[in-house]
Amino acid sequence: MKLRELVEKLNLSVRSARNSLDSEVTRGYASDLLSDVLANSEEGDLWITLQIHQNTVAVASMKNLAGIILVNGREPEEETLEKAEAENIVIMVTEMPTFELIGRLYELGITGMK
């Protein structure tokens, strides 16, 4: 499923790299530990987190993730947005808590399985 479809179906707000919404999501990955995401995420994953600092963009770029969704209405820091635009990393936000968002993603066919 493409990021664009998820934005529409889940009413996500896009904060960066709007021109990259055609990226394909292969699975989901939820973690708030950057070291965990570095060790275990894979290219094409959609990262669910509450972390708003610019290091998230570095991790997403290194792992070639499809995008990042920030939960609980969290907004990325200004430096994070600047870095995301420069690295072409899609950051989206939602008011949903992590548990609810993951359930909705699962219903849409996005799982954590390879």
Image (cartoon, rainbow, N blue to C red):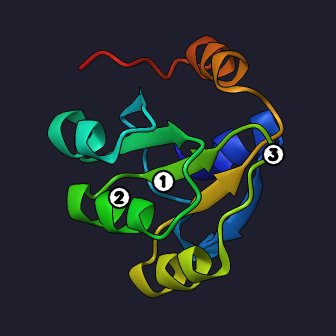
Earlier residue among tags 3 and 1: 1
Q: Is residue 34 above or below residue 64?
A: above
Residue 67 is tagged as 1
Q: Amino acid at mark 1?
A: Gly
Q: Amino acid at mark 3?
A: Gly
Residue 12 falls left or right of residue 46: right
Query: Which quarter of the figure is the C terminus placed in?
Result: top left
Q: Is residue 71 above or below residue 51?
A: above
Disc 2 + disc 3, Cβ < 8 Å: no
Instruction: Determine the CA span between mark 1 and mark 2.
Output: 7 Å
Identify the element where label 1 is drawn.
Answer: strand
- Residue highlighted by disc 3: 73
Mark 3 vs mark 1: in front = 3
Residue 37 is tagged as none
Looking at the image, which is closer to me, 41 or 52? 52
For image coordinates 63% across by 12% down, the residue present is 107
Query: In the rendering, at what x and y percent does residue 75 appear?
Result: 74, 59
